Amino acid sequence: MSMTDPVADMLPRIRNASRASHKDVSIPGSRLKEAIAKILKEEGYIVDFSVSGEKASRAIKVKLKYAEEGQKVITTIKRISKPGLRIYVGKDEIPSVLNGLGVNILSTPKGVITDKTARELGVGGELLCSVF
């Protein structure tokens, strides 16, 4: 069975695993999901991720991050652009999340990047999701 929106499958898996205080979560893999996981790691929202398997049976294992007191690092992670309503923003229209405390992830001609990087490069694109 094929998924209509694989990114919309990834985000709730991470959110639900975080809310249930799991150490890690396994997600069916794709290059787009790997790029999103890489950004989450670079921005400090997850500890690490690993990819296992071959092309069709790839899986991404995401190790979630918690504060010392057990507080969740990811409080909100939500999909913005959906298959039924794509949200595209220009370089001057990229919104900030909580005045810079969170991060938007965009798919641009330069690849999958954060809102801060998109502003620096002067590119717009599809607004995939926001994390804070």
Image: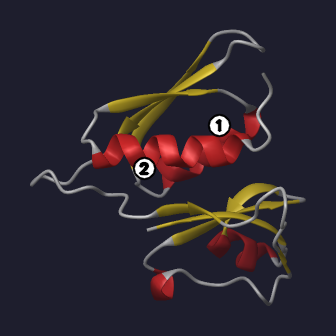
Residue at left offset 80%, top offset 90%: 92
* 10 Å crowding of disc 2: few (<14), some (14-19), many (20+): some
Circles 2, 1 touching at the beta carbon (< 8 Å):
no
Q: Which numbered tag is attached to residue 24? A: none
Query: Which is nearer the eye, 30 or 113?
Result: 30
Residue at left offset 79%, top offset 73%: 121
Residue at left offset 75%, top offset 64%: 81
Q: Against 6, is 102 above or below?
A: below
In front: label 2 or label 1: 2
- The residue beneath circle 2 is 15
Q: Quadrant of the N terminus?
A: top right
* Residue that sits furthest to the right in the current view: 109
Q: Against 37, is 95 above or below?
A: below
Decide which of tag 2 and tag 1 comes sooner along the chain. 2
- The residue beneath circle 1 is 34
Secondary structure state at the residue bearing disc 2: helix
Between marks 2 and 1, how big is the CA–CA gap? 17 Å
* Residue 71 pos. (x, y %): 19, 57
Q: Amino acid at mark 1?
A: Glu
